[in-house]
Image: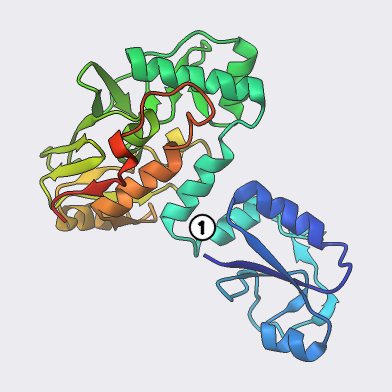
Amino acid sequence: MRLEVLHVPDCPNLLPLLEHLAEVTDLPVVTRVVETEADAARLGMAGSPTLLVDGKDPFAADGDCGRGLACRLYRDDDGRIVSAPSADQLRAALAGVAPPTEILSAWRTRAVPLNAKERAAHQAILRAFAAAGRPSAQDPAVLRALHDADAIRLTSYGEIAVAYPFSATPTRHRVRIGDRVDVYAMCAVDALGIAPMVGEDTVISSVDVTTGRPITVVTRDGRSTWSPDTAVVFVGADAGGGPSADCCCDYLNFFADRSAGDRWMAAHPGVPGQLISHHEAEELGARLFGHLLDGGARLPAHPGGEPRRSGGE
């Protein structure tokens, strides 16, 4: 997805728009200065600033004649005039055109803690899950900050319930790490992200939610074999917004084949998303979780650093 913001020189409303975009996506944003009415008409600039998503204005109104180089104003959800769309309005606009994989990637990227203390605690929690199948104790204040960022989820008693990709309670996605410990993943994509994150072999045991048919993904030395080899993964999310655990984890599942996934999608029209292949699902898992232990103590990488490849495709 390509994001571009058209604006006149020294536009006072450019910064608010860019700040709101940064809240909802980690995708790069190109800014372009427009200085003539002819260029404004050619580029589709309906006032400054104008956001284009893959060349289209998601906030264009029916019958809009265009405002060229004039200042562009927007209306918030209550109808008030504002200088830029809100983060929620931008999130909704991007969700209408962005591939689900990019939405999920941006969602999880925003949840990675940047504060050094929080990042160290986050990595310690992940390493404890990978080593023993359960989280380690941490400063309650740090845990609350990680919860607020959606890096983890806490119970009402302040205990760790989720540290993506891990779940502290059983789910339908069980992962055997290095033939020594069993853990549970929040979703199919999380399960696929564990091997690249910890640098160990894994065996994922899951099921097709429509039939109960077992699905297994075995990763050895960076190579994955799927059984059945027709299996696919659904990537999508509830449009309501909120923590990943509430809005998408229950929907990111394995299906034995595309026909099973298509039937599930037809029965759940309110959950936007798509079916992706072995390779796409593995790449997404690696992109979301493969970097989380970088900069901290982590288990050895796959021998030779070979790229992950999936069998049976």
Viewer-closest of 312 and 257: 312
- In the rendering, at what x and y percent does residue 178 appear? 24, 23
Q: Which residue corresponds to the image point at 85% horizontal and 78% vertical from the top-left?
A: 70
**Residue 239 visible (yes or no):** no
Identify residue for label 1: 95
Q: In this view, does 97 lie above or below 70?
A: above
Hey, which residue is sitting farthest front in the picture? 304
Query: Picture quarter containing residue 301?
Result: top left
Indicate how the structure is coloured in the image: rainbow
The answer to whether 82 appears left or right of 127 in the picture is right
Viewer-closest of 45 and 120: 120
Query: Picture quarter containing residue 99?
Result: bottom left
Q: What element carries label 1?
A: helix
- In the rendering, at what x and y percent does residue 136 appear? 46, 10
Q: Which residue corresponds to the image point at 13% horizontal and 37% vertical from the top-left?
A: 212
Viewer-closest of 200 and 156: 200
Circle 1: residue type: Ala
Q: Which residue corresponds to the image point at 57% horizontal and 20% vertical from the top-left?
A: 120
Q: Which residue corresponds to the image point at 75% horizontal and 62% vertical from the top-left?
A: 75
Q: Is residue 58 above or below residue 26?
A: below
- In the rendering, at what x and y percent does residue 50 appear? 72, 71
Q: Please state the total of marks drawn on the protein image.
A: 1
The answer to whether 131 appears left or right of 65 in the picture is left
The answer to whether 122 appears left or right of 10 in the picture is left
**Residue 42 visible (yes or no):** yes
Q: In this view, does 27 lie above or below 175?
A: below
- In the rendering, at what x and y percent does residue 207 appear? 17, 37
Q: In this view, does 293 lie above or below 110?
A: above
